[in-house]
Amino acid sequence: MTATVETINATPTNGGASASLLELRNVTQIFSSGPFWNRDHNYAVNDVSFTLSEKPALITAVAGESGSGKTTLGRIMLGFQRPTLGQVLYMGNDVGAMNSQERKQYRRQVQAIFQDPFSVYNPFYKVDHIFTVAIARYRLASSGDEARHMIEEAISGVGLRPSETLGRYPHQLSGGQRQRVMVARSLLLKPQVIIADEPVSMVDASLRATILETLRTLNHELGIAILYITHDLTTAYQVADNIMIMYRGHVVEAGDVENVINDPKHPYTRLLVQSIPMPDPNRRWADMQGINTPPFSGIDVTQQMCPFVNRCPDALSECTQDVPNIYELDEHRISKCFLYENAGTVSNVDIASYFNIRGSSSNSNGTDVEL
Ligand SMILES: Nc1ncnc2c1ncn2[C@@H]1O[C@H](COP(=O)(O)OP(=O)(O)OP(=O)(O)O)[C@@H](O)[C@H]1O
Ligand code: SF4
Ligand SMILES: [Mg+2]
């Protein structure tokens, strides 16, 4: 694919073999609410550092129950939300300090796919509109014919027929078709990163597999790095190389997706995996509502404790006295839990430095997951 960062210096920031595309450094997002004498501070994202690399471009899943901070993390990476603390770097440049031209390129190269594609469309315009606006905004084509060709190519690239898609209004497409049109729009812009926030949670099972397969193709064949945000461990297992498990803004466990799901280490991840109807990750795990178990204890969890302490079956006395560090369990796994304090502590770690690098062009998890 053509990288078209005219105005952004490509300065890798994390060294090593993999060039950094999009990097979070100690990012914290605090939402405050309530009267000034009794402000409530909600840490939606809590000191998260990780990098999406350019080479190799991987698929990274972010999973966790509702309210764990997944969407906030994605919005920060998209530049929609400026974090309270920490930095976001795109190819080494601080997103918060970009000028308008740099920001325009960043917006082009870091694309979003949302849960509800319908909300993105203007119902009064035919679907063609979202393509023509993008082409005009970024001056992608020099003639109408060229624009038409580009649009048709992008639509075909996601498995839709241009003749059955263009010229229609959004409500004349199925939910799955609408979602694929959004993927096609991203494809048209030739992004380097796609942040896909629950992209298949509102489409039926038959289309889910197609959309996930499209994401895999974009990653494997075009080298687009993908952040796949999901409630569903099954699809994460199917599509991703690595996974980060979030709980109340913290990344509590991360690493190779197969290892994390087949052998979860953090008590919260264990709870998630146990909520799969059968103890088999190939079984569909569609809904995390079941893991919203009531707290075991009446502990009023503060920022000075493990965030999971009031629900943790393994809690130790120290879990109410401090926030656990990040511990290195092996070369492809970290966990933020005192159970592993005998393992090496890693501070200010870029979580992605523990990710497994996919060696071949195919995902070793295969496609035999029941969707
Ligand atoms: N704009 C906002 N203002 C105040 N609080 C917010 C805002 N956006 C999110 N939050 C809060 O931040 C926390 C994380 O929300 P977020 O939407 O990131 O969670 P999520 O993991 O994406 O959840 P879901 O799975 O339900 O989509 C929640 O407690 C939420 O209420
Ligand atoms: S740090 Fe303590 S409370 Fe938190 S998950 Fe680990 S054992 Fe449970
Ligand atoms: Mg969300």
Image (tube, helix red, strand yellow):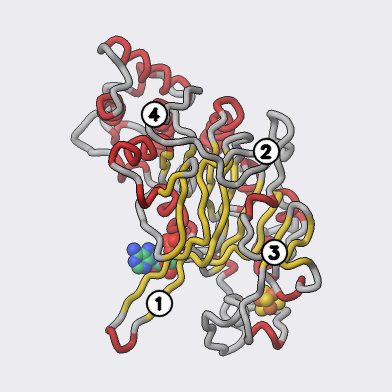
Q: Residue 50 in the image: x percent, y percent?
A: 57, 53
Above or below, 2 against 73 in this view is above
Closer to the eye: label 4 or 1: 4
Alpha carbons under labels 3 and 2: distance apart: 20 Å
Give the camera-side residue of 154 and 119. 154
Label 4 lies in ligand 1 vicinity (Cβ under 8 Å):
no
The quarter of the image holding the C terminus is top right
Q: Residue at x 40, y 77 (%)?
A: 41
The mark total stands at 4
Do residues under tags 3 and 1 come within 8 Å of each other at their CB atoms? no
Q: Earlier in the sequence, mark 3 or mark 1?
A: 1
Q: Which residue is mark 1?
A: 41
Q: Name the amino acid type tagged 4.
A: Glu
Label 2 lies in ligand 1 vicinity (Cβ under 8 Å):
no
Q: Name the amino acid type tagged 3.
A: Val
Q: Name the amino acid type tagged 2.
A: Ala
Alpha carbons under labels 3 and 1: distance apart: 27 Å
Q: Which residue is mark 4?
A: 6
Badge 2 density bin: few <14, some 14–19, many ≥20, Cα 10 Å: few
Q: Residue at x 70, y 52 (%)?
A: 354
Q: Name the amino acid type tagged 1.
A: His
Q: Is residue 184 visible in this depiction of the protein?
A: no
Above or below, 29 against 358 in this view is below
- The disc at residue 17 is 2
Helix, strand or loop under label 1 = strand
Do residues under tags 4 and 2 come within 8 Å of each other at their CB atoms? no
Above or below, 267 against 233 in this view is below
Q: Is residue 93 visible in this depiction of the protein?
A: yes
Give the camera-side residue of 181 and 58. 58
- The disc at residue 346 is 3
Label 3 lies in ligand 2 vicinity (Cβ under 8 Å):
no
